[in-house]
Image (cartoon, grey):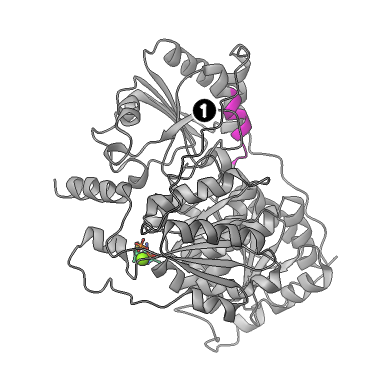
Amino acid sequence: MQLGEVLLTALKQAGARHLYGIPGDFILPFFEQAEQSSILPLVTLSHEPGIGFAADGAARMSCRPAAVAVTYGAGALNLVNAIAGAFAERSPLFVIAGCPSEAERGSGFLLHHQAKTLDSQYRIYSEITCDQARITDADTAPDIIARLLRSCITYSQPVLLELPRDLATVPCLPVVPLSPLPFEPQAISACAEEILDVLSGANSPVLMVDVEIRRYDLEDEVAALARRLNVPVVTTLMGRGLLADTDVRVLGTYLGEAGDPELTELVESSDALLLLGVILSDSNFGPSGKRLDIRKAMLVSNREVQLGYHNYHEIPMGELIQALLERLPEPGRIEPEQPAASPMWEVDDQPLTPADIAAGINLFIADQPDPVPIASDIGDCLFTSLDIHHTPVVAPGYYASMGFGVPAGIGIQLTTGHRPIILVGDGAFQMTGWELGNCQRLEVDPIVVLLNNRSWEMIRVFQPNSQCSDLGDWHYAGLADALGGLGLRVSTRRDFRAALAEADQARGSFVLIEVMLESGAVSPTLKQFAKRLQAKRSL
Ligand SMILES: Cc1ncc(Cc2csc(CCOP(=O)(O)OP(=O)(O)O)c2C)c(N)n1
Ligand SMILES: [Mg+2]
């Protein structure tokens, strides 16, 4: 096989389902191989940020690595922000960036697409990937690819492979996958027993879960652990929607003083907080009323366990959860929780609020036979998604880059086959919403709920007299037809309900429901969140 085909085969064997990318001359031989070999279906969008967010959405929802291929310099550097978000939020993306051949490097010319030096791309990516390598010959290529795949999967973070344009087509031996990184079984046992000691001696233990339990595809195991521990379960902001496909009763999302007071008190007064897969970020803990005493918590994250004043190293979360389960009795029969009665929703001519959007979507999801995954962008749509019950949600709640929602929704439908609902504000839609123009060609048909408040409202919440936040009214629903979809502009609860029903029947093309919000209409959670964060910053 040729090196490019060996790489595609190894990516497929590691779980990648598509190759996302935008070509350029430095990566063109590899693109040709991808097209001709069909080892991985090639997905192109219109702009590298879109490609990165789509691959990220696919990786997060499938719990498998996603592959992204771009050209040298202009392509790879255009992709940087999406990869930085994947790095921060622990999403396993395998980035293949074209680069000059040895002969071109020695030409003495400044090469097109080069930044400061020929190695600038590599150095920039070293800041947003957990491992990097440049292929220099076919002999070492299989081991390099095997190492990068193991790093990508082990740490659930992006890696960079630089592929010189002249090497994609050289003959190459297959990749032999590396065995998982070693760990110490005794350390796993000691750690599990210490955690169980702390939990059994506690008065108010609480289990908090976050994105890593999905990244390592451990939601079912965590659900079994929650049943056996029989302790209250909450998620972080980023972990919203976790365990939705299990029978575990999740009490809700911890939002500190911006959230439910009882849940906040339960978490902040706990004397044994087990943080499984939790990222200690300001978005997850910023609005905390009193500073969480992390020494009273047990943090399991990134192959480390922090317990009181000591740490365990190289503790794979899956191995630890298995060790805990082995030491806990099977639970008694648990009555499956009756699904919460869908809130009665007045279908009237009242103007829509963000809370109405969540209520309408909850009712829509309750009527659907298939799962309805949610992709949310940043803005008040993220806080609106917190009120959407029991469905998997993918959102950049920590790195918080705008533009994630629409492309991520496209990637989610490509990888799961389920029609997603995409929540996006008008500002973020202006950045990457145009990728909807690719839906017909890609045969995906997401339902997009666009919160049009004609403003960067989240900016205005933090800076009320902001003039620059005014965006004007772009009439987004009117653009849908030109992009190959159906556009519906709504402003009342009755209209929104009818639009969702119409969208449900309109398969085969995206449906853009443009929700007109009154100026200043924001979710109570965003208001509280901003107030809390500002109060802390002014200390
Ligand atoms: C790539 C990037 N550039 C700027 C920013 C900073 C920001 C965070 S939220 C926001 C306004 C979002 O406006 P939108 O209309 O989408 O939503 P809403 O607030 O509900 O009205 C900005 C500019 C971020 N997060 N990412
Ligand atoms: Mg807006």
- State the image coordinates of residue 484 (x, y, percent, origin top left): 63, 76
Q: In terms of secondary structure, what is the magenta stretch mainly?
A: helix
Q: Residue at x 42, y 67 (%)?
A: 428
Q: Which residues are magenta?
A: 216-224
Q: Residue at x 59, y 50 (%)?
A: 373
Q: Residue furthest front?
A: 348
Q: In the rendered image of this protein, does residue 345 appear above or below residue 159?
A: above
Q: Quadrant of residue 320?
A: top right
How many marks do you count on the picture? 1
Q: Is residue 345 found left or right of 499 in the rendered image?
A: left
Q: Quadrant of ligand 2?
A: bottom left
Camera-nearest residue between 293 and 71: 293
The answer to if 228 sits in the magenta stretch is no
Q: In the rendered image of this protein, does residue 398 appear above or below residue 36?
A: above
Q: Residue at x 36, y 59 (%)?
A: 351
Q: Is residue 215 found left or right of 307 in the rendered image?
A: right
